[in-house]
Image (cartoon, rainbow, N blue to C red):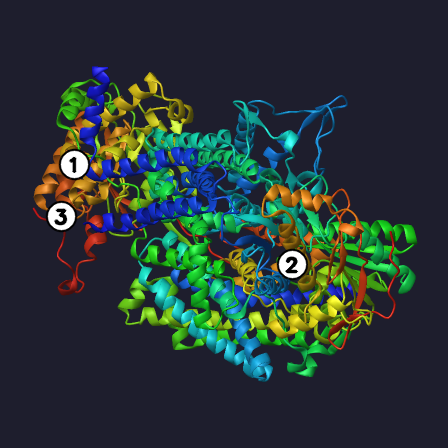
Amino acid sequence: MSIAARVFLFPALLLVGALVAGCGQEAKEKKPAGQGQTPIRIAVACPMTGSGAAFGEMIQAGAKLKAREVNAAGGIAGRKLELVVEDDRGDTSEATNVARKIASDKSICLVVGHFNSTCSNAAKDTYNRVGIVQFSPGSTNVDVCRGSPWTFRNLYRDDYQGTFQARYARNVLKLSKVAVFYDNDDYGKGLMQSFCEEAAKVGLEVVAREAYIRERTQDFKTPLIKVKALAPDGVFVSGLYNEAALIIKTARQDLGMNVVFMGGDGLANDTLVKIAGAAAEGTYITTPFLFNTGQDSPEAKEFFAKFKQAAGRDPDTWAALTYDAVGMAVGAIRAVGDDRARIKEWFAASTAPEKGYRGVTGLTYFDREGDCYSKPAYVARVKNGQFLPAEKQLLDIK
Amino acid sequence: MSEFVGHFFNALTLGAIYALIAVGYTMVYGVIKLINFAHGEIYMFGTFLGLMAVAGLGWHLGFAIILAMAGCAALGAAIDAVAYRPIRGSSRLAALITAIGVSLSLQTVAQLIWGANPRAFPTEGLPAFLLRPVLSVAGAELLGKELLVWVAALLVMLLLHLLVAYTRIGKAMRACAEDKVTAALMGIPVNRVIAVTFMIGSAMAAVAGVLYSLKAGGNISFRMGYYPGVIAFAAAVLGGIGNLKGAVLGGLLIGFTQALCGGYLASQYDFAFAFGLMIVVILFRPWGLLGRPESARA
Amino acid sequence: MSGLAAALRGWLARRSGRDLALDGFFLALALAAAALPLVLGFDSKIANVILLVGIYVLLALGLNIVVGYTGLLDLGYVMFLASGAVLASLLMLLTKTEAGWVLPVGQTGVPEGARPFCGEGGFLPIMLICGLFCAGLGALRGIPTLKLTGDYYAIVTLGLAEIVFLVMFNEEWLTGGAFGIKIPKGCRPRLLGGELYYDTPQFYYLVLVAVLAGAVVSWRLQNSRLGRAWAAIRLDETAAMTCGINVASHKLIAFAVSGFFGGAGGALYALWSGTVAVRSLEVWQSFLILCCVVLGGMGSIRGVVLGAAVLISLGELLREDFVKGPLAGLFGLLGIGGRDPSVARFLIYGVLLIVIMRFRPQGLLPARRGGRPPAQDEERAMRQAGSELFAIGPGPAGPEGAASGASARPVLSLRGVTRDFGGLRAVDGLDLEVRRGTITSLIGPNGAGKTTVFNLVNGILPASAGSIRFRPERGAEAELAGRRPDLIAALGIARTFQNIRLFPDLPALDNVKLGLHRRTSAGLWAALLGGPRAARQEREITNAALRYLDFVGLLAKAQGTAGGLAYGEQRRLEIARALAGDPALLLLDEPAAGMNPQETGQLMELIRRIRDRGVTVLVIEHDMRLVMEISDQVYVLDYGEKIAEGPPAAVRNDPAVIEAYLGVRGGDLGARPAPPAGLGAG
């Protein structure tokens, strides 16, 4: 056989093999769930790479812990619980792809995800179209559940978070001029907008709004020089931990800006401290859940210990939220089986405290949109490299 | 005024780093006419090596930089031997695609080794003078690490100039850049000279990488090389690709444009201004600022 | 019916075994693509992968036009994809309420009672609009970058793409910025009774049809006069200009067509993804599309299809569980157990690129170089058919024609022509006349500036001073200095080159067809739409080209690649190409170089035949026998100046000439090379 034929043959065979394999896979997945002793499959979609990777690690760890416990206790009606983890890379088009993949796999009955608001927003179209419940343990953008009957979440929204932040900054921290850095995506921008709206109402002056592009903007000295000249007494970062760490570090270390630093829950990961080091000391962040407040529920204490033993490190809020999300999903499946539509009915009916799910992070129940208003926001402060509860917490605001 | 001086210092620092990377790009291009897309990944590997030395082994920063340079020099030579040399005679596009393949492979290997989470140099591991201001002009401070960038860049480029202009190997490099075939006929071991070129360019990229992550405060991740790679290419082309002084000039110009336009106009468009400058220059002077027009021969 | 069968049989007979096998393979692939979703469902993973492959094939075909056909490295192709996607989304969002047209960007719902702009069948105009918009964008981007070569062009396209990305990303009022543009349910276009979305049959088959259309268009362009011109530009821009090809306008057409594909592909992409977030359309997509083109085989439609299919489906395949499982195990062994296995697919991609470029740099299915093997009766038929295109000179000139021609006004007059290269004066105040219907020779030692004179006449180099006047029989007198080479070719001047500038990858026949370029006119629309007139012109071009080849004695080698010909044959081919332009003046630059005495004799015979047809010939030569035997007039140059002129015999004995070649008598004769044959001998 000539060389040309051989070289051509290889990719041709590859293609044909791909087709055959894909068809086989397809056939396997077409089998509807609920037959005999096949495992119950739940998808977990989160960023495993990119600048949200640390979140993905925690999310995966929390989900896996819950799945192990469920299986150790006999599974769900005798069937094993199996997790299908998919990486959406924090990217919109990847999230769409992942969503299509999950939705077309009929053996998956629910998806816990996504994490980034941008990804949840992009993916929810597919989930709604095909009809599978999307339960997010981390997307806080206002639009995520809006107009989407199949999307639910177990944490607050950014209009709440942003309002909360602005009031905390003004009333508790007594700041008067704030510069805002925001990640130019759904989450960062949404949170920034709600923060600035409330800031205007409470008399907090926003002297600058500097946008950056996550994973592209690598150096923040240029905008910080501008901001320093405006002499704010606080800097609010609406984005994820990596860029926030760089901003705080450059501002404190390089420019000597001794202002108050605040951030949204995108900073709630210890990588912030790893990167920013000592410069992160004293940073305030909002977070949907906090451990070791002195008022931890028994569930929280138990989870903290279990997680630490299993994963060798302290859990964070995202692990806890995912643990609860999987737990609530398991509860749904126990109640109505693994039929996608019935699961959605169950979720849609969980709109009262009596029907809520009590987990590590508190009581989860939804409003008509699928949003969860039953939990407060906490404020943590970085002390000695750890996220500890801030001295003053703000009372729950509605 | 303080704001302007601050921007000026920042611009010079960025420009120096870009110049370092651009010189490596342009050296390789000058000798084998290859757009080495993997240059950004070598920059990234050097940074990780330096990070491992400081954070993992507890070395002094100076030794860490030397380790990074040596490691990247080896990596550069290895890439040349494995990926580029076998296709030396093939078309330029084949070489370009190979470079893209190398870039992709290096990124993934880095991700597999060091994970996806960005990292930073631990502050405790660094010499104290880096974070202290060493100079204050009109209220704007110049930090030790920024001064280090200037000094290191200047030193490296001076050494490179001496090497290229006054040593035998430098003359051999210049000869190969002009005409490889004749150089070979004169007895110059062309493949070895090319390997040395790669090694020098890669070592410079390693220095640039360590310095940049010190300056920026972190962001050491497997993706960190992509953008600086593109910027360096633009800088090299702006100055006249293949021309070392041009690469330095190009890097400085791009750094200044990015910092000043980003600082005074719109920071989210800082790269757009830099690219815009490059495009405008190329349109009016297609061979770059310091390049020479290729004559049309029939 | 029987005519069709006969045509089919004839077509089949001409295809080689390899071709038929490939055709069969792609046919099977197409049928599988069309049929599989009927079995597995349009929302299945396979269908999704095929859709994605289809969109990328369309994009790769578009990039292929610039990279593969025209030979320009475009690294910024993603800007068409992004522009097309954004424009399509905006057009789809356009709705008409009582208040007028609104564009509800960023909201999640369509206002009550509003009608979208695109309803039933409305997506097709949207695709067209996006394609045309991006075609314009491509041409616009091309205008300032025409003069840029290779890598400079590449980086400028890359820089522009980055700028476009940043603008799109930051200007949310237009593109929704990071949120992207979501196309809500009420705005999704419909076609043939169904919605157009990623899992509907209507969309699926729309994409397949678009891909088919794209392939057909590419194929038609490739085999047209336009496609030939692009190939010429890719292989040798200077020679292309000499054939009368307006390089600038051809490049702009290429950019526009390429942009059209990108825009249409972008529109399909927008519909496929449902949410167009510019963030995902970053510059590295350009590299992916480029890899599809180069990996598959540049310039080859089947190669591009295969390249895109392999790369995209490989990317999706490597995400499957049966791949992730073993990979996870492997990672565990290597001590990196925690890493996500799907990451490894980029490593496999990268290594695949390296390996394929190493062992098969021309790509998996490269474009076929030579022509197809000639069919006997076809050739005979072509020989017999007449062709008005075949013409050499105004007609055979008899002896009285030659005599009267000698007294007519000169065809070419150079007055005071000077050319400086920086400090070097290559041609110094040259006065030269070429008389109509004669063979004039230009001789002189190496470096005398002879080829430079040709470059000045031909327009490749601008003169620093002086005038060059050209007086063809048919046409007005013209000043050549300062004109573009392709315009000079159009006036009726053709040339060959000292170091042969053929188009080596093209068949010999195509080389001659390119010589005919300036005398024919089928352009973009003829290539796309075809029609009997265009087909007839193509046949005439082929006929004429065969006859030109016959004239120089190369008919048997018509289908072989030009690069594969023997050296002497290549020189004759270049002459055939030059003659195909029906020039009034033919410039031959060292046509006898490297030939043995027998070949030189045949060449002299050929030149005489050309002169006898009435074409004026100007020859640069070192072979003194040829010069002395065929020239009517000889000019001698040294250091850029004319040192002698006159009939061959006079020049041969001119002391200045002897000195220029041999040096002054009385020097160290032992070290001089032997005088050229014929000079100074008897």
- The x and y percentages for residue B34 are 41, 59
| Dot 2: chain letter | A
- The x and y percentages for residue B10 are 69, 66
In 3D space, how far apart are the residues under numbered discs 1 and 3 (Cα atoms)? 37 Å
Q: Are marks 2 and 3 in contact (CB under 8 Å)?
A: no
Can see residue C195? yes
Q: Which residue is mark 1?
A: C557
In 3D space, how far apart are the residues under numbered discs 1 and 2 (Cα atoms)? 60 Å
Q: State the SS at label 3.
A: loop
Q: Which sits in the foreground, C122 or A347?
A: A347
| Dot 3: chain letter | C
Which label was assigned to residue C679?
A: 3
- The x and y percentages for residue A388 are 78, 72
- Disc number lying in front (2 or 3): 2
Q: Which residue is mark 2?
A: A217
| Dot 1: chain letter | C
Query: Quick check: A100 above or below A288?
Result: above
- The x and y percentages for residue C403 are 18, 23
Query: Quick check: C625 above or below A357?
Result: above
Can see residue C430? no
